[in-house]
Amino acid sequence: MPEKLINDLIAGNLKKPETGESIKIPIRKILIGSGVIKQILSLLSELNFPKRISIISDDNTHLAAGAEIERMLCKDYEVSSVVLPPDLQPDERNIELLHAYTSASEAYIAVGGGTISDIVKYNSFQQKKPYICFPTCPSVNGFTSSTSSLIISGYKKSVQATLPKAIIADTDILVQAPERLIITGLGDCMARPTAQADMLLSHHILGTAYNKYLFDIQNDYEKELFENVNLLAKRSFTAIENLMSLLLVSGLSMHISGSSQTASGSEHLIAHYMEMMFDGKYPHIYHGEQIAVTSITAAKIQESLLAKELIEIKPIYYQEKPILKKFGEKLGKRFLDEVIKKNITEENAGKLNQKFKENWKDIRQQILDIHISSEKLEEIIKSIKGPFTYKHLTWEHKDYDEAINQCALTRDRFTFLDLAMIVRQN
Ligand SMILES: [Zn+2]
């Protein structure tokens, strides 16, 4: 059944409820399952893929699949393999190098995890050359997002990129992924409930968009995944395939909505703050490992506010001075431009308080209906021996505390962290 949803999305059979128009996705095919690597030749011919192809992998993923793909294609295509060092940084230098190595090619195949996918999709967008994504681990939802997470001038940034023409996710290869990368894939999926709660809250407070169907399409995969984490730990083919499918649909939900909000709320803000402000202080921690921990924290904060029978908020005006003092001129100015969009005037606070008096019970119920408790989230990640406290990530308490309390200042996104700052304590 889940596979049907992916096929329906590709075929344009699903409609946007708000307008009735078909959802269009530029990905022409997603092959997922055991042994699908064998279909690569027929797929390339079906896609009318160009003849000169660069296969981009790293030392590990070349062995896992890159070499095999090269062998399968070398008779009919002019292939060259670019094998990068593992743990490559997706920064300007490596992007330029990749561009130089692949300049003679007409198309690419990205064989690897999130970083390889990110640099190839960015290169593909810049060079206007198509690519196929061949994930070797179910570790991120970025395989199907149209942005790349790159390090530009020393800062992690999300930049415009492009979607692949096709995705080939072979479970024979995915089940052999390193354990940490499977945990990180599951961890990134744990953001859905807190991100949805934040988006729904923002919808009620600021009137921002909330497209419930973009979360609904993830439901079946998520239920299956969260109820069977023990099978994931045992690397059951079905559980791995389901995790991969959920990551792909989660990425597509961002692409369809044109915003990362369907997969990223307060839990991502906390993690991004830790990465940005304490860069180099801590050892490398995978994205989804961070998100597993920050999702549990974000769920706890949401629970404490959702426990209230009634809420009342104060107006808020973000001031330049303390923000510039805290973050410095350059970052401070950038954050200020974002955060002032969340100013709440006295008049608006009054209107919202009136709305809460009349509707808070209903709003609260809507959010509780899509919420997963912090306790349950903790249980999920524990059953695969993943991290569930900041201590497991080697983060210090004072830094983590700062991230929780300050990260709302870095983005215009309204989340429960904002509500926590402006709610009147009674
Ligand atoms: Zn994420």
Image (cartoon, helix red, strand yellow):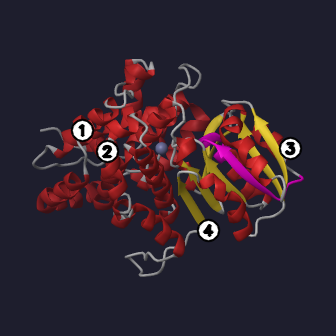
Three-letter amino acid code at disc 4?
Arg
Q: Which residues are magenta?
A: 104-118
Q: Position of residue 176 (x, y in %)?
A: 54, 36
Other residues around mark 1 within 10 Å, as few (<14) / some (14–19) / many (≥20): few
Can I make out residue 277 in this image?
yes
First along the sequence among labels 1 and 3: 3
In this figure, which residue is indicated by the disc labeled 1?
A: 376
Earlier along the polypeptide chain: callout 4 or callout 1?
4
Can you identify the residue that label 4 sits on? Answer: 28
Question: For the N terminus, which image quadrant?
Answer: bottom left
Mark 2–mark 3 distance (CA, rounded to whole Å) = 42 Å
Look at 87% across and 51% down and name the residue there: 103
Mark drawn on residue 101: 3
The reply to whether dot 2 and dot 3 touch (C-beta < 8 Å) is no
Marks 2 and 3, the one that precedes in the sequence: 3
What label sits on residue 226 in the rendered view?
A: 2
- Residue 3 versus residue 420: which sits nearer the camera? 3
